[in-house]
Amino acid sequence: MDENSHFEFDPLAPPLATSAVEFCRKMEVNEKFYGVLIVTGETILLIVLSHIFHLFLHRLGQPSAVSQMLAGVLVGKSVLGRIMAFFHINGPGGDEDHLSSMASVGRMLFMFLIGLELDFPFLRSNLRRAAAISYSGASICSAVAICSTPLVYNLTSSGGSKALFALTLALILSNTASPLVIRVATELKLTMTESGRLLVAAALVNDMSCLLFIAFISVLIPTGSKETGSTIVNKMLSIFMSLCLITIIASAVRLGVRLLDRRSEQRRNTRDIEVVGILIAMIVLSTASELLGYSSSMTSFLLGALFPRSGPTTRTTMGSLSYYVNHLVLPVYFGHAGFQTDLAELRHRPVALAVSSLVFLSIAGKVGGSVLGARLLKISFKDGVVFGLLLNVKGHVDLITISLANKYRIWSKRTYNVLLITVLLSNMLVGPAAAFFVRRERKAQRHRSMGLEWLTLDSELRLLAGVHRPQDAPTILNLLEISGGSNVRSPLAAYLLHLRQLTGRLTTAMLYHQRVDGHEIDPAGDEIHRAADTFADQTGIAVRQITAVSAHETMHRDVCNAAQDVRASLIILPFHRRQRIDGRMAAGDDGIRAINRRTLRYAPCTVGILVDRGLSCKELHQVAAIFFGGPDDRDAVAYGARLAVHPSVSVTVIRFVEAGGRSLAGLAPAVKEEEVALAVGEAAEADEEFMADVYQRFVVSGLVAYDERAVGGAVETVEALRAMEGVYSLYVVGRGRRRGAAARLTAGMEEWEECPELGSIGDLLASSDFMRKGTVLVLQQHRLVTGGSGGGRLEFEVEEEERLIRLRK
């Protein structure tokens, strides 16, 4: 090549490389234009290959980040970079520099999205626990790094100070990449659980602590007056100025978002141009803070965390950003880590030994420290192992640390490559390992009963409420408000699911925070979203809104899938009939009724059918939790006890007991007497233990009132229920599945059921001929019955089959 050529290439590059570069020189291709073409091609390859890899690897339980890193390895120095000349441009105009810039912008967008989705109240209330998990793992990793410094130092022939080498190595091994942790945890659906959110909080605490430590170290270590002319005072001043700028701009952004929300008050979403303006402002501010000496990642994260939590602007920004970030930005961001790693260095035995040692020690240190912290917080051993694996994920902070150490010549070029390979291999190992443990635990949980009776009062209630029409929203939202969200003793995670019937060219999909059909006007959806936004502003309870669009025949799948995605403990769906002005129930929608029946059959958690007769948010609610016996009634009482925590709710547990002695008469003659006695005995024992626990915990303390009604049969039961009309504003009752004495108290009532999905008691209370005042919530507990070769079946399926057989006879 002549001396005027802009291209430099490795003299050991293959003939194809030389031919391509010579061709570009002869065609007089401009270097910058050529660089743009190269970066564009690499970006397209990263995105396409990551999606292709994930298409196969996700079947093996691997998170998408692993596929994206593998794509980066294939496109980068390890494979294609050694074959094609297009990946041999060196110097400041090289493709790697351009990809680094793109990855930096992608990291800003991703951290901004994390800030938008951050559960800030949870982080604030669990900061101590998160710090305990984070710092326990970091402490052990730091000790391991210091002890292994002589080995790594000698294997990589590093120069410079051993003390600085040990300090930098400790920082790298103890750090956690919160963006990657959040991404993997989201794909494993851990962020919907309390332990998963504690994991995310621990990752954020670790990441922010490491960034602060790096900033502190960079201030103390001078870069030389000849290079930048900076001093410690100037650096501190720059960081202080950037923090002040972030605070001022964040306040201005909040004010601007409020103004946009008022302009978009009659719409569900803001305009796309406004969202683009918000993102551009975020990127400009984050870049400015980077120039002032503060981390652009933390700037974008803080801007997202300080963003308003509700309103059309926030909803549109999250909906628009999440799709592009997950499908376009993250493949470039995570692929860049694999792109700059040269795995060919592993052919050298000292490098391979150093990498394997660091990977093993890093994983062992994180897992050991996290398990220790989990034991101190009384968290299970399995959760501690998952915490340790995912907190060992490395990312941008490690790359920054490695680059700074290389700049200050703390170690050699070989050490630089060793640590890059260590970061990559750690990420590729811990993600699949954590996925294995999580999925194994989930398979075990499929054979466990999931009910509200086992949910402690201070545990989070994850409630998924479905609405079909705007008229369903007021009562549903008022029920959410009294379900414990206003009291830290009984936390609530509320999700509002708008169920819209498939029409025209709509396709069945779960559209989180998005328009249902492009620019189609959806007045019903707009009204529901405005009601939810107003509710969130007035009560302070964050309501995450979801839209499901499908045919009535398959809509129950959307409900069940959404419940699994958000790890719901309770699903509440509106009854297919609505009350008219005269108090009677209008003719219902058979499609909605079919959805309710199928959801009862396939739901992964407790399901409630809400018969809406109005539930005001201003009055003092009198709630009756009716108990006969059985798992459904136990869930009804458990939910009633949770409602009692709210200051505007007064709950009375009304237990119906048999006036006479217990007898086995009247049960199905086809069942053997000893089997019946065993089943009845177990059911009665479970009911007695449950009610004794409720009495000691809630009745004795005065939180819940208790009333016992002795009845001799179904006729007296009906009379006692009729006497409650007008006394209570909400009745919570179980769907059925009663045995023994509880079954005798309602014997024969099922023959008059008009809506079997409500059960005999729920159907009676929902009847206009029986009662016209008081909303009714009928609960069915999720329970699996195992037996025979057929595996597990829902118990109410067996009950329904027996009922149909009796009716045929």
Image (tube, rainbow, N blue to C red):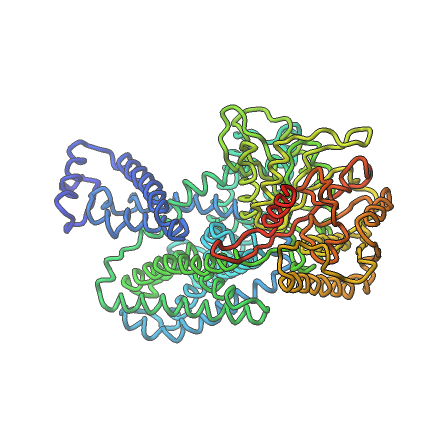
Find residue 378 and report its horizontal and vertical position in percent.
Answer: 59, 69
Please say if 558 is above or below 486: above
Please say if 383 is above or below 805: below
Q: Residue at x 42, y 46 (%)?
A: 104
347 vs 562, left or right, is left
Find residue 345 and report its horizontal and vertical position in percent.
Answer: 24, 60
Quadrant for the C terminus, please: top right
* Residue 198 placement: quadrant: bottom right
Q: Is residue 635 or residue 763 the one in the foreground?
A: 763
Residue 94 in view of the camera = yes
Find residue 125 and report its horizontal and vertical position in percent.
Answer: 65, 58
Find residue 262 and report its horizontal and vertical position in percent.
Answer: 67, 31
443 vs 802, left or right, is left
Q: Is residue 604 or residue 483 the one in the foreground?
A: 604
Q: Residue at x 82, y 29 (%)?
A: 582
Q: Residue at x 77, y 62 (%)?
A: 662
Q: Is residue 643 or residue 340 the one in the foreground?
A: 643
Residue 642 in view of the camera = no
